[in-house]
Amino acid sequence: MDRNCEEVLSPNIYFDRDFEIDAAKILPGEYYVTARDMVLVTVLGSCVSACIRDRVSGIGGMNHFMLPESGQDQMSPVSVPARYGSYAMELMINQLLKMGARRNNLEAKVFGGGSVLSSITSSNVGGLNAEFALGYLRTEGIAVAGQDLLDVYPRKVYFFPHTGRVLVKKLRKMHNETIVEREQAYRSRLQTADIQGDVELF
């Protein structure tokens, strides 16, 4: 298999002049996996991003997801939120393995889960997203090499899968309306998401 092939579920590819490297911007509900030396970028509010890579080959990816609301137990493996979260994680892990990553070499760094959506702060959406991501990785036996979760600030995350380096910028002084609007629109889409069955891992 050509290790240079990529799974393009993020159409936002550009050249980052600060790092002088190709970059992919990951929006809510997207993920991107690559074997190239590039940077994956996202901005997180209540959503969570798992950055997973093969620490030997450098094949890695980033996702950006939120659990949909449900009246059921959020952490129950058969609940809609848990099924959606598992689906979001498994899609990316499947692509990593398809591109040549080895499961026993995978490591993760996890970010986000901030309390930035004031209208749903009481439901602790950010905390539930963070709890799910860590619990999923623990269940799957994927080591968590780093994390920056919860708090009240949005974050901009730069992930360099080739080396595993991550830069996190907490957005303390900017207007966060765009982040909030983007996540609220994504959250609305999740209400009608139809996640059926399971994704088989390789």
Image (cartoon, grey):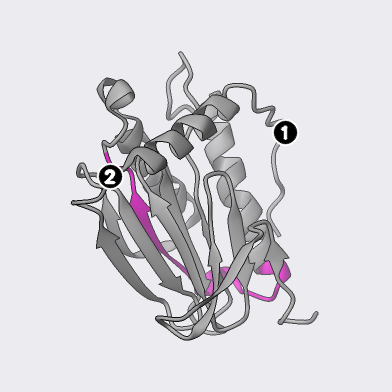
Whole-percent x and y of residue 31? 59, 56
Q: Looking at the picture, how far across and down is residue 69, in whole percent?
A: 47, 22
Q: Using the rendered image of the protein, determine whether residue 78 is visible from the camera's viewpoint.
A: no
Query: Is residue 59 visible in the rendered structure shown here?
Result: yes
Residue plotted at (72% across, 81% down): 3
Please tell me which of labels 2 and 1 falls first in the chain.
2
In the image, what residue type sits under mark 2? Answer: His
How far from the left and from the top, in percent, is residue 22?
A: 56, 79
Which portion, as a residue range, is magenta?
Answer: 97-114
**How far is the residue under mark 2 from the one under mark 1?**
40 Å
- Answer with the quarter of the image where residue 24 lies: bottom right
Q: Which mark is residue 175?
A: 2
Residue 158 vertical position relative to residue 73 in the rendered view, above or below: below
> Pointer 1: residues within 10 angstroms few (<14), some, or many (20+)?
few
Residue found 30% across the figure and 65% down from its top: 168
Dividing the image into 4 quarters, which one contains the N terminus? bottom right
- Relative to 19, 22 lies left or right: right
- Mark 1 sits on what residue? 197
Q: Locate residue 145, reporting x and y percent.
A: 34, 68
Q: Nearer the viewer, residue 180 or 157?
A: 180
Magenta span includes 104: yes
Dot 1 lies on which element? loop
Residue 131: name its quadrant.
Answer: top left
Farthest top residue in view: 71
